[in-house]
Amino acid sequence: MPNVTIYNSFGDKLALFSTEGFSSSIRIGRSSECQICLKGLADTSISRVHLILIQNPFGWKVRNNSKTGMYKDCIKIEETELKEGDLIRFGALFMGFGNASGPSAFDLFWTAETENGHTHAALWPGRNSIGSSRDNYVCIRTDDISRIHAFLTVNGNNAVIRSATLANACLVNGEEVGEEERELRPNDVIKLADTEVKFVNAVRVSFQEAAVEVNVRHTGAKSAMEGQNMTVMYVIIAVFTVLVVLLGFILYRVL
């Protein structure tokens, strides 16, 4: 069964869980009533119950349950079927479906002062919207950057950028970029209005289980760790039962 990973905007993995063992739905949000509780990991951009994963005969789909919504390929959606490698943005977080999902090999860095104090962000496979709106995949909140300023698309080790509109000033290494795509290389300097942003190779921290333990509440199911613990317990009970039977047999023969 597919794994699901929750990332922050820097590309750091916050949580990992398997869909195996869950019944028909999985609620994700800040509420302690959610099977996947992100309380303490997420800000108020994440609703109490933000996403609902729903199992169907063909696999899993995800449904939005929040006013702030969810996005796929920079498009706001209410519901979609999930396939291996899919990435869903919800609030300030990202959800990857399957082992093939996750951030790209590139990041953006900037030195300009921003409202949230962030100085970098991960880029994701496919199309990334960049702008001052919190609805963007890369949010850079400065006075000069437009709500949706540019689109940067990553395909494997290749990346291109284009301006969202001709009215938005966008330059790469001093050369103007319009609505036609311009290829990017590591260490290229992108200028969005008056804000300089550097396109760089990312350095990801290795991750095995989960950076932070999340509150996984299964309904009629067990988490992977709980399943392992139950298996160990059953083995211990079985061994103990065999020992008791052997002891009884020995005592019977002796007496």
Image: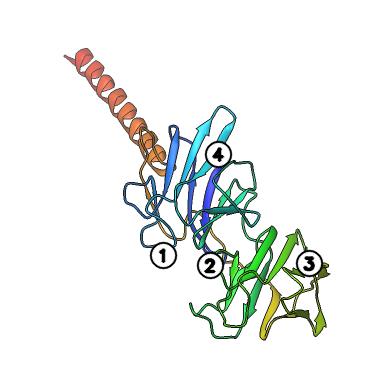
**Distance from Cα at disc 4 to Cα at disc 2:** 25 Å
Q: Residues within 10 Å of mark 3 (few under 14, many from 20)?
A: some
Question: Which residue position holds label 3?
Answer: 160
* Precedes in sequence: disc 1 or disc 2: 1
Quarter occupied by residue 67: bottom left
Q: Which mark is residue 134?
A: 2
Q: Nearer the viewer, residue 4 or 196?
A: 196
Question: Which residue position holds label 1?
Answer: 43
What residue occupies the far left of the structure in this picture?
255
**Distance from Cα at disc 2 to Cα at disc 3:** 22 Å
What amino acid type should be assigned to the residue bearing mark 3?
Answer: Val
**Distance from Cα at disc 1 to Cα at disc 4:** 24 Å
Question: Which residue position holds label 4?
Answer: 61
Q: Nearer the viewer, residue 102 or 150?
A: 150
* Precedes in sequence: disc 4 or disc 3: 4
Q: Which mark is residue 196?
A: none
Q: Nearer the viewer, residue 78 or 108?
A: 78
What amino acid type should be assigned to the residue bearing mark 2?
Answer: Arg
* Precedes in sequence: disc 2 or disc 3: 2
The x and y percentages for residue 7 are 53, 59
**Distance from Cα at disc 4 to Cα at disc 3:** 30 Å
- Split into 4 quadrants, where in the image is the C terminus? top left
- Split into 4 quadrants, where in the image is the N terminus? top right
Q: Is residue 28 left or right of residue 57?
A: left
* Precedes in sequence: disc 1 or disc 3: 1
The x and y percentages for residue 58 are 59, 30
Q: Nearer the viewer, residue 5 or 236?
A: 5
**Distance from Cα at disc 1 to Cα at disc 2:** 13 Å
Q: Residues within 10 Å of mark 2 (few under 14, many from 20)?
A: some
| Foreground label between 4 and 2 | 2
What amino acid type should be assigned to the residue bearing mark 4?
Answer: Lys
